[in-house]
Amino acid sequence: MPEAAKNQKLRSVSRMKDIMTEYYIGAKTARETGKKVAWITSGGPVEPLLAMDVIPVYPENHGAMIGAAKMGADLCQTAESMGYPSDLCSYARADIGCAATSGGPIGGLPEPDMLVCCNNICGTVLKWYEIQARRFGVPLFVLDTPVCHRGFSPEAKGYVRSQIEDYIHFLESVLQRPFDLEKMRDVGRLSIEAQRLWQDVLLTLRHHPAPMSAFDAFFHLALIVTLRGTPIVIAYYQELLLELKERIAEGIGAVENERYRLLWDNLPVWYRTKWLSEKFASWNACLVADTYTSAWCSSLPYMDPDDFLGSMAEGYARIYLNLGIDAMADILMEMIDTYDVQGVVMHSNRSCKPYSFGQYDMASWIRQRRGIPVLLLDADMVDPRQFSEAQSEARIDAFMEMIVK
Amino acid sequence: MIAAGIDIGSITAKAAVIADGRLIAVHTLPTGYNARQAGEDVFEAVVCSIGMNPTQIDAIVATGYGRNSVSFAQKTVTEITCHAAGVYFLNPSVRTIIDIGGQDSKAILLDDRGKVKDFAMNDKCAAGTGRFLEVMARALHAEIEEFGKLSLKAETPAAISSLCTVFAESEVISLISKGEARENIVAGIHESIAGRIGAMLNRMKWSPPVMMTGGVARNIGILKALEAKLGTEILVTDYAQVTGAIGAALIAAMNGAT
């Protein structure tokens, strides 16, 4: 294995940490400040909550923090001792374990006043949110988005749109005040602008060498997930974009002497991002794109800044994870071309079945249509008990030996 | 140019020496608990076996799970690349390798220059590995070396359905208590492994000729079960267990002297 090659740190990182700290302090002190808290799924429509001045909190983002803090195994075991099987998603197990013990890196999430669940990312969230609604005795709203195998039928559109109206009524009834349409328009515009900026940030990785890597994107993703629709996200991504453009101008790459460019599929292995990033960097390989973080700007073609409420049904239904695998494969092929990659690393994620389903087919299509190698890496996003370092290392090294040859 | 390859597996440490493109010596030793020591011992043994001393070796490459503990190697290369190089040296017509080692099993596809085109490995599980066979041999009070011949005497292979090594062991114990013939149980174990490896291979676009490497290739029962599963002849050489070490030595020779 070649030595050397380090990862270059971005200076924006410290500002990002401050923003996330402020956000969590705001959420944890909501009771004192008289604000309401809603727990929401990562792909859920957050904008109406912001329009109603509700603080959105994301158990999945919290799950990622638990994973990165290497607290996943303990909290998953807590959920398992409560009777949940080890086959259940580790975000769900970590969240359930955390809610029962107020454990984790920030002492648990603030108690919710309501829950908003959108099944555009998976089916597990339905039962997970039902469990938490029962635990906290709070109302739950479910937005059901049919899978868009290819295209979006008028029936599906009508079905999801009618639920957006139900969602507005749900918020009015829980909060006991009328929906603020004017603020909704502002939040909608800000959300779309933030998604555009996020896309611009990711597109800088087309440059050789890439000014940041997918590992940086995993980290910077937190803002577009948790705070889209607020001005702070826009200010931050503008600043980050500026830094990335400076790096491009100076020819600075995320990985020293970038020689190989790879694409990552699926969620990160949160408790091993540093190890993985150093492992790939030691081969002068940079993960320049990933299907995961780009999902938070993949709906832009369907979103209308002048009619956010009207277009969000389609925007939220047509996110990457809610597509058929043919449509997902088309997006993957496009990314391979856009980012000029020489190989694809697929994290076969024990926790995320909808994301990992179809990877073997997609891998063989990539080999056929693009003629580049694909590595399947077995792991789990939060539960380190599903990760074997020796096996992963052998696979990555052999994969890189194949690319380098 | 005299080059050596050291392959530290989870069960066995292997070494090979290549001189001017010719294989001149191989050696194996149990790895034991100290991979570093096993690497030094097997290297010294292989060098002594040809009446040389370690300073006469121009280049060394280490491979296998313990590759990073071989401090005197100039380079480490994964066993996947090494098996490919070793097989290409032994028989350049081979396009598919099945390597069943102590703690994992792999399928490797080669191009016509002997380079790795694609590979697959068993997931984090001992089923379908040499260790799986060792556990079963212990449960059956049989020597692992007898396993192959025993299974050839089977009339009806017993069904072993569990994928988990520990559960499969319980299944074997339960079959023993039911009075099932030992030969049938061993054949059932082989079929279970062949089924798993066959599925892994069939996920890839494999093509014949197929060669089997790794210590388990000496087991005629597994070989026959795999041939039946894949519907093709599987080649095995006397060097199956040391193919990775041979490949490592070849790569060392190619990379030149230190």
Image: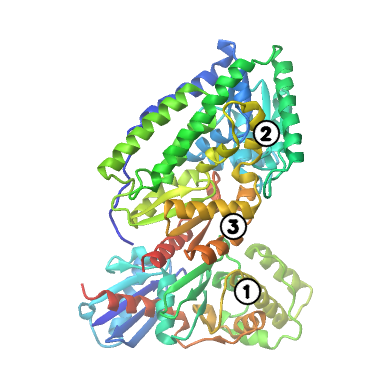
Pointer 2 residue: A313
Residue A47 at what x, y percent from top left?
A: 60, 25
**What chain does badge 1 belong to?**
B
* Secondary structure state at the residue bearing disc 1: helix
How many labels were placed on the picture? 3
Viewed as shown, does residue B21 lie left or right of A396?
left
Q: Are marks 2 and 3 on the same chain?
A: yes
Q: Amino acid at mark 1?
A: Gly
At horizontal 56% and vertical 79% (from top left) the residue drawn is B207
Q: Amino acid at mark 2?
A: Ala
Report crowding for label 1: few under 14, some 14 to 19, many 20 or more residues within 10 A (C-alpha). many
Q: Closer to the N terminus: mark 2 or mark 3?
A: 2
Name the image quarter holding residue A167.
Answer: top right
* Secondary structure state at the residue bearing disc 3: helix
Label 1 and label 2: CA atoms lie apart by 45 Å
Q: Amino acid at mark 3?
A: Gln
* Residue contact between numbered discs 2 and 3, judged by CB atoms under 8 Å: no
Residue A36 at what x, y percent from top left?
A: 62, 17
Q: Is residue A101 above or below residue B196?
A: above
Mark whose residue sits in front, 1 or 2 = 2
At horizontal 57% and vertical 25% (from top left) the residue drawn is A188
**What chain does badge 2 belong to?**
A
Q: Are marks 1 and 2 on the same chain?
A: no
Pointer 1 residue: B198
* Residue contact between numbered discs 1 and 2, judged by CB atoms under 8 Å: no
Q: Is residue A312 above or below residue A111?
A: below
Pointer 3 residue: A359
